[in-house]
Image (tube, helix red, strand yellow):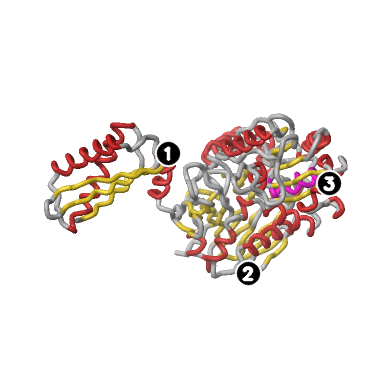
Amino acid sequence: MAKQNPPLRIIPLGGLDGIGKNMTVVECGPDMVLVDAGLMFPDDSQPGIDLVLPDYTYVLENEQKLRGIVVTHGHEDHTGALPYLLQDLNNKAPIFSSKLTLGFIEGKLSEFRIKAPKFREVKDGSHISLGQISLDFFSMTHSIPGALGVYIKTPQGTVMHTGDFKLDQTPIDGVRPNYAAISRFAKQGIDLLLSDSTNATVPGFTKSEAEVGPSLYAAIKNAPGRVFVASFSSHIHRLQQICDAAKRCGRKVVVTGRSMLTNTRVARELGYLNIDEQDLIDAYEINNLPEDKLVVMCTGSQGEPLSALSRMANGEHKTLSIHDGDTVIISATPVPGNEKAVQQVINSLAKIGCDVYDKSRTLVHVSGHGSQEELKLMLAMARPSYFMPVHGEAVHLRAHAALGRKMGIPADHIFILDNGDTLEMRGGQVKLGTPVESGVVYVDGLRIGDTDPIVLRDRQKLANDGMVTAVAIVSLKRKKIDAVEFSSRGVSFTIDDEFAHDAQEAIIKVIEKGKFNFTASGTDALRKAVRDSVSNFIWNRTKTRPMIIPVVMEV
């Protein structure tokens, strides 16, 4: 019996459990291509964690197959894991992306002091072959220039990955989605479509980026003093509109924030951001300029505590501070999980006396992702046999799947997957395959790896209820506890003499009831008894559960 040819395997390692850490493996026989390598920022349930990466163990285990890494565009949720992945990879496969995206990646790798692998610039209409996998790139419109979709051909069938997109007919740089290419691929046949689901719950069409410009201009024109605009540093189209509005209003532009400085420099060098040198000034030169002649572009639209906007609002920035009479424009939407942090920054600015604009007040932001009608148009143009929603939380993936059913795709041809699930294609027929190892990797300071869930639980406990240390002084000779000393941090109650006396009595009562081995080797059981008795006592007395650290000292 002839050996069956290996299937085409599509393996999402990230991007299906939230807006972030996008990473998808495309594997056919001896050849493998990785599409995107992004990160996600931690939420309130992950205190102390700096970044969240997809678990790319599968890529490392099969790195001999890796022929290239394709990056659809330059946002952190598609590029941020690259420095960590490249440090772990021995196979220095080339990276394929647009000129701007490669510029951003090069800057990111230099920060990590990583020698960049080979960069291969691709653009609308580019074609490359990597073993049995061939790729055709086509332009898409997103909130960053150089966004690409990719059409993938293999002996077992075809896949189209839209990347992040919206169908903007009036993009700032004039580069519209390549509808002709999408239609051409549809005629050739798209067996499986992977499509952006971020706004699948939003009815209608997403407004054009061009509609933001007049609102930005009006806000800057009417500002009596300085204007601070917080935006994503990679949102080059938005930065272009800010610069254009500032110039029309006769204002100079200051750029501050590490990533904002880096990305504006790269975008200007590569010709994606156009502003005259004479209209840019250094932050140290602002004292020579009237306040109504200044616009500051900065990071901090997500309420990040170390961002330029937060530091300026708190008076901690080395060159700039925000004061009464300034105008602040938050030109972004909070990423899910960041809403509280953004609102805190807005409240802090309001207390200072700033006039704050955000999208609830006027049109200073539009999404870079297509809403329901655009997603339906994409499905209508692509006419896929099978459909897999990507890039979203569970609610977005399911909403997108429902749109697919409305567009006539049979329910059994739509796959809502979790990270690590696998699709296998043979002869254009798609079915579920064997899952692979998946999960998340936490970046915690200098440590990169699986942070124990117990550690995160303990951090939450410390943040919520504080900590109590109970030092039990044990007499091994007399086989009893002589005394217990207490100390606390961050608790909502006071440990006075009465409290300490009652808690000590509770511990002694538990110890006397139990049969403990009062020897050096029996202190583990004693520690557990002390911890449990103190925890129960505090709960009964205060209805709180601080972390208990028991210490047993032998005398």
Give the percent coordinates (x, y) of residue 199: 63, 37
Q: Does dot 3 land on a helix, a strand or a loop?
A: loop
Q: Is residue 89 above or below residue 180?
A: below
- Residue at the spot of label 2: 115
Q: Does dot 2 land on a helix, a strand or a loop?
A: loop
Q: Earlier in the sequence, mark 1 or mark 2?
A: 2
Quadrant into which the N terminus falls = bottom left
Q: Earlier in the sequence, mark 3 or mark 1?
A: 3
User: Mostly what secondary structure, the magenta segment?
Assistant: helix
Q: Does dot 1 land on a helix, a strand or a loop?
A: helix
Q: Amino acid at mark 1?
A: Asn
Depth check: give the residue in front, 389 or 354. Answer: 354
Residue 536 in view (yes/no)? yes
Spatial separation of the CA atoms under disc 2 and disc 3: 41 Å
Q: Is residue 446 above or below residue 194?
A: below
Spatial separation of the CA atoms under disc 3 and disc 1: 47 Å
Q: Amino acid at mark 2?
A: Lys
Q: For residue 385, what is the image quadrant?
A: top right
Q: Is residue 9 left or right of residue 159?
A: left
Task: Please provide the residue range marked out in magenta.
Answer: 232-244
Spatial separation of the CA atoms under disc 1 and disc 2: 43 Å
- Residue at the spot of label 1: 464
Quadrant into which the C terminus falls = bottom left
